Amino acid sequence: MKKCFYLNRRNFRQNASRNRKIFLFFLFLTISVNKSLAEKYPSLDVPEDILLHVKEAASSQSPYSGNHSVKQAVDGSMESANWHVPGVHHVEGEFVFEVPETIHYIIFSGANFNEIAVSAMSGSSWKDLGKFDISGSRMIRFKKPLQKVRKIRLTVDYPEGSSPSFTVREISFYKRVESALNRKLLKVFKDTSCSSINPRCTLTDLKALPEFLQMIAKKIKSGDYEDKEFRIASYKAYSHPEFAAKVRNINALNKFDNPTGIVAEKGDEILVFVGPTHGEDIGLASVSPAGIESSSYPLNEGVNKIRINRSGLLYVMYHTDISTPKKPITVHIPVGSGIVNGYFDVTRHTDKDWKRMISNAPHSMFDIVGRNSMMILHTKYLKDYSPDSITKSVRVWDESVKAMWKIMGFDKYPQPHNNRQLGVSVEGGAHMFATWYYCGYSIGDQGNTLKNEVLAPGVLQGNRLWGIGHEIGHCYQHPFNWRSMSESSNNFFAQLILDQVTNAINGNEQASDMENPCKYLLSEAVKGMPFHDLNGWAKWGFAQYSFYLYFHKLGINPEFYPRLFESLRRKPLSRQAYEVSEAHLALYERICNISRTDFTDDFEIFNWFVPIDRKGHQYGDYSFKMTEEMARASKARIAAKRYPKPKFRIAFLHQHGKTVNLWGQNLHGSQLNGYWTKYKQNAKLSPSVSASKKDNMIIVRNGENAAAFCVVTNGKVVGYYDRQKFDVSGVEWNDTSKVYAIPIQTAEPYKLIYAAGRS
């Protein structure tokens, strides 16, 4: 018993001594924190990873010009020309080091490829290391460092049928240097992010750290850590942007879902403390203002010292397979490293926060994070055009993207991807454009693009949201697109968000800009032109949007488009991307098969089956050859299925919502025949519908429930019309001419309402 008592007394003395040290430590933290926050932050001596010198670089492929050779990729300059090899499906580069080296990772700055093969020579023979996916991170981090490497060979292969354009600005090979500090950090901080204090830390433990880390500990303990919201944050995992592109057949989505709210300048040395990474690879990216080019830097658990080679906003790059839950990673960019710019997150901030943030933002660009969307926009124009509020704008962007994702069945057919849709304001260039990873909005017009077509309420005036819808639509159009349709099939999404976002927010249909079929398509189709040659901006109205109106707006089958898109993802329209002839007929058959409805009559009205033999160019050369035999075989395959006809005549169905002057009449879409609400009401043609002719004008009475009217001369339709008073001077007219009212219902025949021979 005495022995046990002695041990307990000894333990007590030891614990008391330790508790006293801990007490002194916390007392020290408390009384020492009152130093001015404006003091010059002391430096922290952390070894930097070693950039390996490349002695020689060679490639057997000819570059774009002598100034774009492989040597430009290892000259150590981000400002020099890039290594660029267009039009070549196999690109290979070989890199020789001064002495045998250890290589931990490779960084590819400004690379436009996602997969690269690596081989290494350590002795006298090459060893194939396999292919690496660099999407998102733009780096390869080897699980085991490469030892005694004399040469590295890098190879990029593009699939046949693609349009290769190999580009990379800098390729950097690095040897990692471990910091001895990492072992000391855990005595003072709970983990290597240095974001909270270890409760068992003593004053002795604290004094063992460099002065800078002591100061950080004091700030954290006191709760007086300036800009802590942005300097210390937990970052969630995001899918590789290219994953969605692969499984959804869309453009790759946002790479920069994890903004830090911190900006750093070229030449800055910044510190980054990283907590447990759970076996995941993460990095940091600095993104140029007014653009989307970035430089990547690997991040390891513990303290990292990074020399910034590209000025810009900083983002944590945490891309991985999210099919299983992934833990967040805490990253701490301490005071003295970079400048806090902040960012707006609609899930955390209000318009009151926005007003404060944007008025104080020091950088030229600012991050705005929504639920489904994200914008990186020029601060100046945000201050000019949205100084007090941004939440309504974010709502418009989010709802627009959500509508597109829903119609494509992303919720019905889930896949493990969670990247947002990104928009960036850019200096110069086109008014608007779409590319992989983002959509660009020019500020070349003094920011009016942002004012009128990106920021609410500008986008809610009239059809201003159309521009965003058109560009974002480019990112999602691939499943039902082919060459010659690239600037029209995307408009399906433009009209969709006008209907589901603009109209929903404004509470009316005044903003809808759907051109009714009679204005362009039917007026051209009666001339015998093949569908391909009909008005490029309007033909999508039938090819895509009319089916949205029929199945979704009328409520006939709200699952139609999600099922169609999923079918198009699983089995593309053609064996080769953009093969026009094959895709054109395949879309007709796919629509009929997915809906189990025979729409042949409507496709016939729009000359879908008129033979064509045409070569053209739209984002690449294409040829379109469809013979009468091909069309006949396609129609026969559908006829053999014995599907029922649709309930309504879809060819005349429209949602033309604007009041405009068309053929001398100021009419809103609801005043035109074929407007969707008449279909919704299943309106019946009046038994008393009739017409008369005065000079060249046809005047229809009691024809408001007709889908449309047509003029038939010599047994052939020569004109279609969507109003009850129309001019026939522009069409062939003789004693054989007749005017018919076309019922909405397919079960009802055309009704003769005027005959020239009888007048």
Image (cartoon, rainbow, N blue to C red):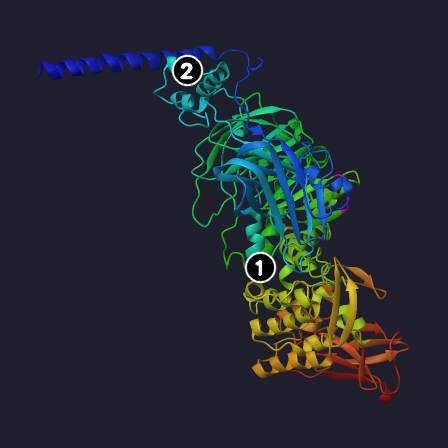
The residue beneath circle 1 is: 408
The tag on residue 206 is 2
Q: Which residues are magenta?
A: 427-431
| Helix, strand or loop for disc 2 | helix
Q: Is residue 21 above or below residue 673?
A: above
Residue 75 visible in the snapshot: yes
Q: Which mark is in front, 1 or 2?
A: 2
Binning the other alpha carbons within 10 Å of mark 1 as few (below 14), some (14 to 19) or many (20 upward) gives many
Queried whether the magenta region covers residue 434, the answer comes back as no
Residue 335 location (% of width, % of height)? 55, 21
Residue 63 location (% of width, % of height)? 73, 46
Q: Are marks 1 and 2 in contact (CB under 8 Å)?
A: no
Binning the other alpha carbons within 10 Å of mark 2 as few (below 14), some (14 to 19) or many (20 upward) gives many
For this orientation, the residue located farthest to the bottom is: 758
Queried whether the magenta region covers residue 429, the answer comes back as yes
Q: Is residue 32 above or below residue 264?
A: above
Which residue appears at 30% of the width and 14% of the height?
18
Q: For the residue marked with disc 2, what is the amino acid?
A: Leu
Residue 46 location (% of width, % of height)? 52, 21
Instruction: Work out whether residue 339 or residue 756 is closer to the camera in this orientation and state it.
Output: 339
Instruction: Work out whether residue 119 or residue 18 is closer to the camera in this orientation and state it.
Output: 119
Q: For the residue marked with disc 1, what is the amino acid?
A: Met
Q: CA distance from mark 1 to mark 2?
A: 56 Å
The quadrant of the rendering that contains the C terminus is bottom right
Residue 107 location (% of width, % of height)? 59, 37
For this orientation, the residue located farthest to the right is: 695
Residue 108: which quarter of the image? top right
Secondary structure of the magenta portion, mostly?
loop
